[in-house]
Amino acid sequence: MRLPPGAEVGAHQEDVLDVLLVVLAGSGRLTPGQGGPPLTLTPSTVTWLPRTSRRALAAGPDGLAYLTVHRRRPGLAVKPAVFAPEGGEAPCSLDRVCPECGRMSQESAPKYCGECGERFPER
């Protein structure tokens, strides 16, 4: 990553991965979200940022170039949605797609496919 002089990466939190931050060039400041003192960043500074830690970065007058090292990020997954009592349409409609022919039913809770007659799985 390269930040131009004076640029900032606002306070954020990585919930999944531990991150190793290695400064390659320039200077800057890393401010931990736990209220600790800011860390001055200079070339060859290496710091470990444990998962769930909050932090913010600010580039110095010469900008800041750094590398982040971490395990491979897990793939994205569709998770069940939680809806308010008034309801709403689910963001994923796979439960309305016929497992046999692939036709999407117009019904919100189909029992049988209108195209091929296949029974939809119980929910």
Image (tube, grey):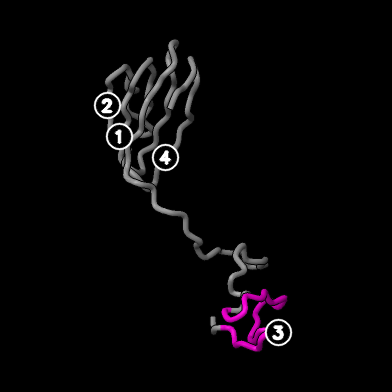
Residue closest to the far top: 61
Label 2: how many residues lie within 10 Å, few (<14), some (14-19) or many (20+)? some
| Position in image of residue 52 (x %, y %) | 36, 43
- Read off the residue under disc 3: 114
Callout 4: helix, strand or loop?
strand
When asked about the image quadrant of residue 114, the answer is: bottom right
For the residues bearing labels 4 and 1, Cβ distance under 8 angstroms: no
Amino acid type indicated by mark 3 = Gly
Q: Amino acid at mark 2?
A: Val
The mark nearer the N terminus, 4 or 1, is: 4
Query: To which residue does mark 1 refer?
Result: 20
Label whose residue precedes the other's in the sequence (2 or 4): 4
Q: Identify the element where label 1 is drawn.
A: strand
How far apart marks 3 and 2 lie (CA) works out to 61 Å
Q: Amino acid at mark 4?
A: Gln
Query: What crowding class fits label 4: few (fewer than 14 Cα within 10 Å), some (14-19), or many (20 or more)?
Result: some
